[in-house]
Amino acid sequence: MTANSHAGHCLIEARGVVKSFGQTPALRGADVQVAAGEILAVMGPSGSGKSTLLHCLAGIFTPDEGEITFDGQRLDQMDETGRTELRRTAFGFVFQFGQLVPELTAADNIALPLLLGRVRRKAAYQTAAEWLSRLGLADKGGRRTGELSGGEAQRVAIARALAIGPKVLFADEPTGSLDSLAGEKVMDLLTGLAREQGATVVLVTHDARVAAYADRQVMVRDGKVSALSLAPSATGGGVR
Amino acid sequence: MSVPLTLLGLLEREPSHGYDLKRDYDTYFGRGKPLPYGQVYATLARLARDGMAVAGQAEPGDGPDRKRYAITPAGTAEVETWLTAPAEPEPHLQTVLFAKVVLALMLGRPAERYLDAQRAAHLRRMHELTALKRTGSLMDTLLADYGLFHLEADLHWIDTTTARLGELAALLTRGATPEPPERERTR
């Protein structure tokens, strides 16, 4: 069984990816394809290698072996400058603890990647204000992110990730630190807005309720990826 | 819990008398609710009638039925079909999954693959319920939540059992039997 995409053209592909940390192997020949516009959930037990896979697909880690292709470009052969540029312009990230800058306001955090991309200050803050409004945080733009609740901080992280108009949104346990209802709101916004923008989403989670938002799920076990698809149903008749 | 399919699965392991089947069923799957002899023999007769099992000649001895039953190729195919097909995802199906996992390991079949198929079926249902929450009323949301939390509990069981398959296979391979239920131990 493969872990290949089943719709749209292939935007990201990993082939035979091996990655170790010292003597500890994390990925042992991982293969996966992600179609443009799809929401893919990467599931697996703790330590299975699912976060390492996300970091390789996003060009944060370089694989020891194997190939990573993004939109026809070999990420694994790209130099650090090229990968940094890609992460800044084409990829958005939402992590478990947001990784916002706590000393800056919510608006500053959203505007920051735009300013780094040489968007003019006024336009960057205007975009930030629009995103804050879309995420129901219009009155929180001036607050430092350290003063926000966990759910509000994750919504700011989603805004920061999507404000640059990424082709791919990488999310690693985006609701891991939230209660059930706050997590639900974050997932509704994350998947709803990503679809609206036509962004592809790679979502790493151990939580089945979060994975249920995805179009497709794959499982990472012992550093390899397998598809989760139904066995052929043959339940008609017979002994019950 | 399908008694006929479970008995058929036990027959795939080795041809058996009704008495042996009842003993094994009660040990592994009875959970304090022994199967009546009448049900065992009636089920075996139906399995034989439907071509899933064949009965040998009656053997001398005490008891109501001394025939040894053996599974047929059609019966083996039926067990395979049952084990392979994910159960309808609904609350409280753990006993069916439990029986499938134990039988699969007893028969040397790929229990992990069956659990993966069940996980996929559960996730598909959870995806449908999640979509319903986005479009439905608050009442729909509450009902979908009820289903989602129960399916999530099943998935925790599936994940934990997947992690314990090696240990369980070793237990069953050694021929060890689980401890009898508390009620029987304290008699």
Image (cartoon, coloured by chain):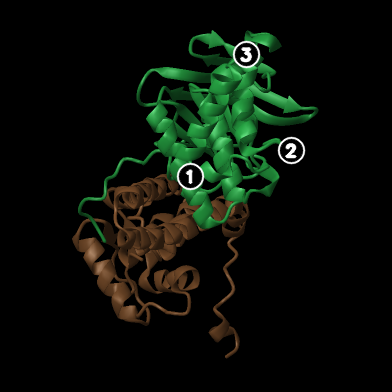
Chain colours: A green, B brown
User: Can the viewer see residue B90?
Assistant: no
**Badge 3 amino acid:** Glu
Chain letter of disc 3 in the image: A
Report the residue marked by disc 2: A103
The one of A69 and B80 positioned closer to us in this rendering: A69
**Badge 2 amino acid:** Glu
For the point 64% across and 32% down, the residue is A108
For the point 56% across and 30% down, the residue is A161
Disc 2 with disc 1 on a shared chain: yes
For marks 3 and 1, the one nearer the N-term is 3
The image shows residue B7, relative to residue A199, as above or below, that is: below
**Badge 1 amino acid:** Gly
User: Closer to us: mark 3 or mark 2?
Assistant: 2
Report the residue marked by disc 1: A136
The image shows residue A37, relative to residue B138, as above or below, that is: above
Label 3–label 2 contact, CB within 8 A: no
Residue A85 appears in which quarter of the rendering?
A: top right
Chain letter of disc 1 in the image: A
The one of B56 and A145 positioned closer to us in this rendering: A145
Give the number of callouts: 3
Residue B2 appears in which quarter of the rendering?
A: bottom left
Label 1 sits on a secondary structure element that is loop
For marks 3 and 2, the one nearer the N-term is 3
Q: At which x and y percent is residue A155?
A: 54, 42
Residue at the outermost right position: A22
Residue A85 disc label: 3
The one of B117 and A213 positioned closer to us in this rendering: A213
